[in-house]
Amino acid sequence: MKSFDVLQTELAEGTTTCEKITEEYLRVIEEKKHLNALLAVFPDKAIEQAKSVDRKLQDGNAGALAGMVVSIKDLICVKDERVTCGSKILENFVSLYDATVVQRLRDADAVIIGKNNMDEFAMGSSTENSAYGRVKLPQDEDRVPGGSSGGSAVAVRAGMSTTSLGSDTGGSIRQPAAFCGVVGLKPTYGRVSRYGLVAFASSFDSIGPLALTTRDAASVLQVIAGHDPNDSTSADVPVPNYISQLTKNMKDIRIGIPKEYFGDALDSEIRQAVEKKIDILRTNGATIEEISLPHTEYTIATYYILATAEASSNLARYDGARYGFRTENAADLSEMYIKSRSEGFGAEVKRRIMLGTYVLSAGYYDAYYRKAQQVRRLIKEDFDKAFNDVDCLIAPTSPSTSFKAGDKMDDPLQMYLSDIYTTSINLAGIPGISIPCGEDHQGLPIGMQILGPQFGEPTILRVADFLETAH
Ligand code: GLN
């Protein structure tokens, strides 16, 4: 497994080519097929693309990501390829166009190698909700890689691509990154175009990179960030140079530790691992202070009301008529709708659609949906206040390390509680990065998050990059 800067050096020295790099990933993909991290592989197109990158490298006009091979979560459109969202209902649906992020990766000369397995419509925390089988954790195949971008995290961890794209609605980039021991970045809402991302909860969804290093994640963000006229929620805010700000200097940084994120729910080994990193930052000149995010206890409830409400509306379009799967036997139109949806969606997606429809229904709208919108504002204000005093926050990514497959499948609430430290960031629309932070006594990766204010990516990347090499 080589990070992008290592590959770039080798390319510059002439000891490898983009074609050879791509061939090696294709070999590993074949060798590690049983991990089930990829739903589609594009060997011919990838090699063809790699050859053209090699020609550009020779001519001296290659793009910023020449030599990087990327796999894409299967809810992001790649032209002329299937986009299943891990669902039977979109089994044979082919994208008509490239998502903006995919187009930008191609323009920067990254090679697109395949599509990552995922929880159906990105609903889940273990990648066990895929209609195409669960994804296995490379370190212990009886365990889960986290979710919903479990395939994207495993692809990077196992050496099937240099980086990958995931999506994060409530933690789906950061939590699998933590479980697999890789870096996962959820950018500010609106920083990266959602054009060509199949919607789960539109006011939360963010696309971001998973990578072996912070620097690699920053290189991908550099290319995919920026305004897009095709996404009205994408922000027209200039994109700074992320790489040049990775200074390894912590002297003027003020870091807040939200006390609510270090309560009883947190595993003690994770607490110790994160506290060790906080000590390193303190020793290197950062100012550390405890802060409070008082509405934290309402995060999970608020998220699961609002995200299911938005999902029930977004998923109404899969009716058997317009996309993908349609039932074989229906007597009339309404039976066709009902049966197509009943047969096409999995259990978790149906649960969310029912929950979302319930909280939006006339009699309950004020009690649930409107109330949750108000609490969302309070949660956002907690963060705004904190960022008046500090530049970033540090928190664990997940209350536990990877769990055994099957452990939480019968208890949705337990599964939802895997997200207690991640969903607030999506409610507030701010950026967060999860980086590896040691291992527990079973050798399972531990992750920690660095959270910043809106468009605070330069700071969180800087702290993450520092911690990667500091001891
Ligand atoms: N695990 C959370 C959920 O199931 C988050 C999912 C996501 O970020 N896509 O909703």
Image (spheres, grey):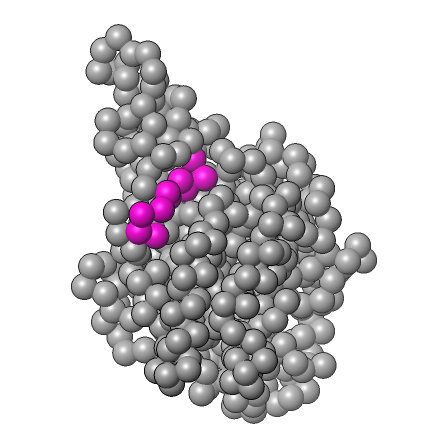
Report if residue 362 is visible in the image.
Answer: no
Residue shown at the point (69%, 71%) measured from the top left: 275
Q: Quadrant of residue 153?
A: bottom right
User: In front here: 326 or 469?
Assistant: 326
**Is 257 drawn above or below residue 140 in the view shown?**
below
Tell me where residue 439 appears, x and y as whole percent.
74, 62
**Is 241 drawn above or below residue 83 in the view shown?**
below
User: In front here: 21 or 327?
Assistant: 21
Range of the magenta residues? 78-87
Residue shown at the point (31%, 23%) measured from the top left: 326
Residue shown at the point (24%, 16%) measured from the top left: 334
Residue 79 on the magenta segment? yes
Report if residue 206 is visible in the image.
Answer: yes
Residue 98 on the magenta segment? no
**Is 38 drawn above or below residue 247 in the view shown?**
above
Tell me where residue 107 appears, x and y as whole percent.
32, 70
The quadrant of the rendering that contains the N terminus is bottom right
